[in-house]
Amino acid sequence: MEAVAEVGGSYAELSQTFRSRRTRSVAWRKAQLQAILKLLHDHEVQIFDALHQDLRKHPVESFRDEIGVVLKSANYSLSCVEKWMAPKKVPIPLLFFPSKGEVFPEPFGLVLIFSSWNFPISLSLEPLIGAISAGNTVILKPSDLAPACSSFLAKTIPLYLDSNAVKVIEGGMDIAEKLLQQKWDKIFFTGSPQVGRIVMSAAAKHLTPVTLELGGKCPTILDSLPNPSDIKVAAKRIAGGKWGPCNGQACIGIDYVLVEDRIASALIESLKKNINRFYGENVNNLENLSRIVNKQHFDRLRNLLDDPSVAASIVHGGSLDEKNLMIEPTILLNPPLDAEIMTEEIFGPLLPIITLNNIQESIEFLNSRPKPLAIYAFTKDETFKKQILTETSSGSVIFNDVMVQFVCDTLPFGGVGQSGFGRYHGKYSFDTFSHEKAVLQRSFFPELEPRYPPWNDFKMQFIRLAYRFDYFGLLLLLSGLKRTFA
Amino acid sequence: MSTMELEAAVGVGQSLDELRQTFRSRRTRSVEWRKAQLRAILKLISDNEDHIFAALQQDLGKHPVETYRDEIGVVVKSANHALSCVEKWMAPKKGQVPLLLFPSKGEVLPEPLGLILIFASWNFPISLALDPVIGAISAGNTVVLKPSELAPACSSFLAKSIPSYLDSKAIKVIEGGPAISEKLLQQKWDKIFFTGGRRVGRIVMSAAAKHLTPVTLELGGKCPVILDSLSDPSDIKVAVKRIAGGKWGPCSGQACIGIDYVLVEDNFASTLIELLKKTIKRFYGENVKNLKNLSRIVNRQHFDRLRNLLEDPKVAASIVHGGSLDENNLIIEPTILLDPPLDAEIMTEEIFGPLLPIITLNNIQESIEFIDSRPKPLVIYAFTKDETFKKQILTETSSGSVVFNDVLIQFLCDSLPFGGVGPSGFGRYHGKYSFDTFSHEKAVLQRSFFPELEARYPPWNDFKMQFIRLGYRFNYLGLLLLFFGLKR
């Protein structure tokens, strides 16, 4: 009940703040961005603790995947926001001379951001940075499945940022529903397709534009690589990309690998070595590995392995520690394609390896499945690269590495099809939270009489020529040298 | 479901299957295919101009010159522009990648979304159908176009001629009313583009939500004109001419970017009204029973809707010109009202017809607050030479677009994004924005195997932590020092 009142009160306050126009100035935006940097700097240790508590993340992983990302983004926005805010001149047809055209970015107003539990700090603050840079007021709803981080954000954000403009509202489905009933100027959602549908349906009632950052089964295509050191690097990157980010619980994390038959065992051996090196050999004491977020997801993952034909395909790992919500890095070789592990997004440390006769078949394999957020492909074959690019569709494509597209601010980050729509990072963040207003300045002279009735052949001919931008023809017409014809 | 509806439903399913097959064949990806379709649109228009004039005369009573100006010419311009630019638009754009990831190559590669559903509106049934189709085609998609059934001659024309000119396995026209629209909306599209009213916009977006389909909604709103005092009498004449032309010119006021109402200072109202009357006479004739160059109201339902707006006694009392209705011919005379009550429907709902309220203010500055306290419109028009006031309008109001000292022509500028904000919609098109709205911009990153950044991987240690810290600040000097052991 209190929470419901909180939503109404917060919303009213944000409306008032936005109307005061305080959030429009460069100074305000930069101050908020600097405040985010200071918040991170002052509270690094608390953030490490919260992430360890919620997900057992090691501090270095926390810095790499959460704090560092936000630092980078805030610094980048700080250095660019003024440029991004500036109107852009655009050319106007000579026919309308003298005229001036420009595109003028303005904030939407009240923005609602839902973040996810797997990267509870970066997936909260990164969109927040975008919304602030664009001059909006924001309500951030962190995921209740990462309660320590949610609580941290709720406590510290008001101490550093303009608390009448940027608010954190904690809670679960109830609060989310209440928030979704309000009229927002933009909603940014990171999460599952299922909840994405709920968000978009709610947004439809108010005609609110949304960005949906969803997930999908991100495949890795592993082509044969002639150079043994390349193979080592590829296997390392795959291992790092599967279990590194939150133990597989990542939207751009590797879901499964496609590889030719004859390479499978070499890959498995190499992966095992990397797993041992990264996470230790002791299954009861795995290091540097996040835990599964909660019992529900743990059970979900366990169920994936319960299917006997899936269990039979395990070639490494498979042990589960229910008490600590730990699942060992697990490799499966050719589980059945119709098993849930191959039809649903895994979002966990289970890595199916699917073998093909010929790596070219990976294209058809991918195309017969929903479009993922990212396709990873390790190959040096330029033709094959081109084929992947032109014959598949995904949010992004990365060749010969995994995950790093996430830190490149010049690349739009977002999905397509089931993996979502809209994008952010870098200027795309600014754009996603802005309305680009078209502005046309005209003068009173000269006047184009043919625009107006009463109609006659001359005006018809004028309009015909004008739409072809046939200025020479128009001159001839005006000087009476062009005959009007029906 | 009736037999006809069942047939239609089956038809929808089959059409989609065919489109999917075509898209999978990759035929629509080539530059050649796209250009061929665009040329086909130009040919369709040039071969059938007379039919188009006839269809628009039949559906809306549009004069051929108005039809050319608002429908045919727009499509010709857009198709030509897309033809000359499509290859450039299709090319991947390079994106810079941080030095830290050297050597790497980043680019953004546009690709078609796949199957597009386009709903066109009835007021500009040719241009609002073909302009989005041009965008969808340029971007390499397959398309189902659903014209509005409220403009049946145009709908029928499009349904007959498009298959004769364009790739009929890639671009289809499906005619019908709400039942067919519902059936279409149940399917899974890769993008839906909708032009129309807010109520149906909500229905479209809700349906799209089930399949997580992105949508562009081109809606409407009450587009105001702010008329500031202008010192030069010839400027005043031009302003009034543009206002009259912008109100009654496009489809007799039935236009999303058409002028809805005018805000003007008290002392100027009567001058404005006099000038408007003169202009109306010149444009549309003096004989109320035989108005020329004026479209009719699209149908009985809208005619009644507009009549009802005038039935409110206080509203009727505010009529200072016009007000006569010809039910047989669905014509409503250009009507000017002076200060109808602000809570009357004529001032709370989008008029979409030839009724022009003039609202007087003590001071034109009040127009800002007036507009801000109402839903964001598709366009704000402002006639003023006051640079400070212009700036104020720009920064203190929000709308899809702002046009100073003219009306409607932003629609023809392909470099300006055309779309709404808030209740007037979201998304945009025209020019390259059309191409973009029907594309997915795929991020592509090419990395090499060497060098390898060991610091990315566990087991963790202080060196790696420090490396990552410096990495995220792009502190390359610091990284070098760290490598050489010179940084603790």
Image: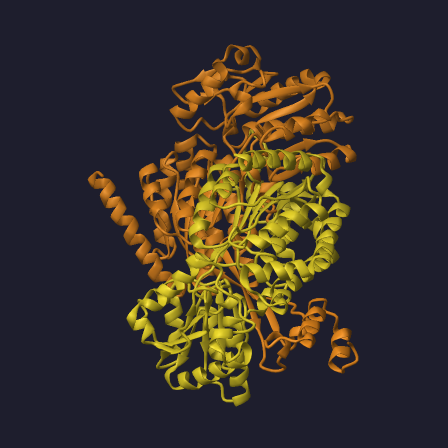
Chain colours: A yellow, B orange
Q: Nearer the viewer, residue A374 or B376?
A: A374
Side of A36 relative to A179 (left or right): right
Side of B403 relative to A143 (left or right): right
Q: Which percent across, then down, holds residue B294?
A: 50, 27
Q: Which percent across, then down, holds residue A241?
A: 52, 72
Q: Residue at x 78, y 35 (%)?
A: B387
Residue B232 visible, this angle: yes
Where, by quadrant of the figure, is residue A60 drawn?
A: bottom right
Q: Which percent across, then down, holds residue A95?
A: 65, 44
Q: Is residue A381 above or below residue B21?
A: below
Q: Nearer the viewer, residue B139 or A267?
A: A267
Q: Is residue A228 above or below residue B488?
A: below
Q: Nearer the viewer, residue B341 or A218?
A: A218
Q: Residue at x 49, y 81 (%)?
A: A381
Q: Is residue A32 above or below residue B102?
A: above
Q: Nearer the viewer, residue B321 or A266?
A: A266
Q: Residue at x 49, y 67 (%)?
A: A248
Residue B177 visible, this angle: no
Q: Is residue B365 above or below residue B147?
A: above
Side of A321 relative to A63 (left or right): left
Q: Which percent across, then down, holds residue A173?
A: 47, 45
Q: How many marks?
A: 0
**Going by the picture, which residue comes out furthest to the left?**
B3
